[in-house]
Amino acid sequence: TQLLEQSPQFLSIQEGENLTVYCNSSSVFSSLQWYRQEPGEGPALLVTVVTGGEVKKLKRLTFQFGDARKDSSLHITAAQPGDTGLYLCAGAMNRDDKIIFGKGTRLHILP
Amino acid sequence: GAGVSQSPRYKVAKRGQDVALRCDPISGHVSLFWYQQALGQGPEFLTYFQNEAQLDKSGLPSDRFFAERPEGSVSTLKIQRTQQEDSAVYLCASSWGGVTDTQYFGPGTRLTVL
C-alpha cells in the first residue's frame, strides 16, 4: 500500500495549458515536499509546506497543503517545455521522521 | 561543482557479484541518506547517517546490503551477492542537519544486475 498516492501517473499537454497534479494520503503529515526529477539526475526540492491550508507560489507553480494535512496539489500555469519532468511529492509523518516518497507524476509538455 | 557526487554513474554486475557504490556529500553536511529508486517508482529510503553514526537502517532490504561512513564524510553502499531485483538507481542525498533539513540529491548510480 502506497502511503502517498500521486495522480495522474502520466500527463502530456500542450505548451501554454494549465494543469494540476495531486498527492493524497489517508494519513496526516507534519510536512510535505514537492520535488522535480529530470532524467539522469536526482530529485531537486521545489517547496516544503508545513501548515494546513498553506499556499506557496514559485513563479508559475502554486503549491497547496490541504487543511487536514493529508493532501497537496501542484498547479502549473501556462506550462512550458522546461516544466517536463517527474514530479514527486514526499512527506514526513512526524517532525523527525524520514521522508516517504510517492511514485510521482511524469509530466510532458509538448511545444 | 559543490554538489553531491556519486560514482560510478552506471554499474553492470553479474548475478552473485559484490558491488560498492560511493557517495561524496556536500562538504560540511552532517547527514547522509541512501535511497533506492526502481524503474517507475519514487525513491525508497534505505539508511541514514549523522556524521559517522548510522542512525536508521530500517530500509535496507536484506543483510546483503551494508552501508558505512567511517569518517563522517564519504559513504559507501555495498551490496553482496547481487540479485536481479537489486537493479535500480541508488540515490545519495546530504543535508546540513537532520532528517527534516533540505536534502540535496546526487545524480545516482544506475545498477543493472544480469
Image (tube, coloured by chain):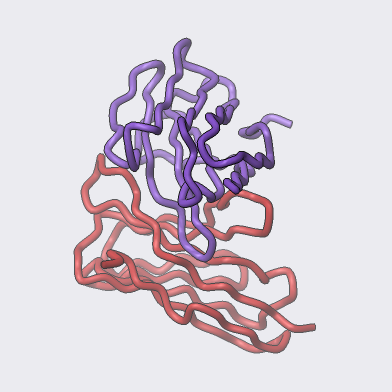
Q: Is residue A44 above or below residue B70?
A: below
Residue at image position (66%, 83%) is A78
Q: Nearer the viewer, residue B41 or B106?
A: B41
Exactly how many numbered labels are in the figure?
Answer: 0
What hue represents chain B? Answer: purple
Residue B88 % position (x, y): 53, 50
Q: Which chain did the renderer colour red?
A: A
- Relative image position of residue A86 (x, y in whole percent): 57, 66
Counting from the top left corner in percent of width and height, residue B104 is at 54, 40
Residue A27's image quarter? bottom left
Residue at position x 26%, y 70% in the image: A25
**A51 displayed left or right of A111:** left
| Residue B48 occupies quadrant | top left
Q: Is residue B41 left or right of residue B47?
A: right
Residue nearer the viewer, B69 or A52: B69
Q: Residue furthest top?
A: B71
Query: Residue A71's spot in the image, x, y percent?
Result: 30, 71
Q: Nearer the viewer, residue B44 or B64?
A: B64
Outermost residue toward the right in this view = A111
Question: Is residue B72 rendered to the left or right of residue B45?
Answer: right
| Residue drawn at point x = 34 percent, y = 18 percent | B53
In the rendered image, the quadrant that contains the N terminus of chain B is top right
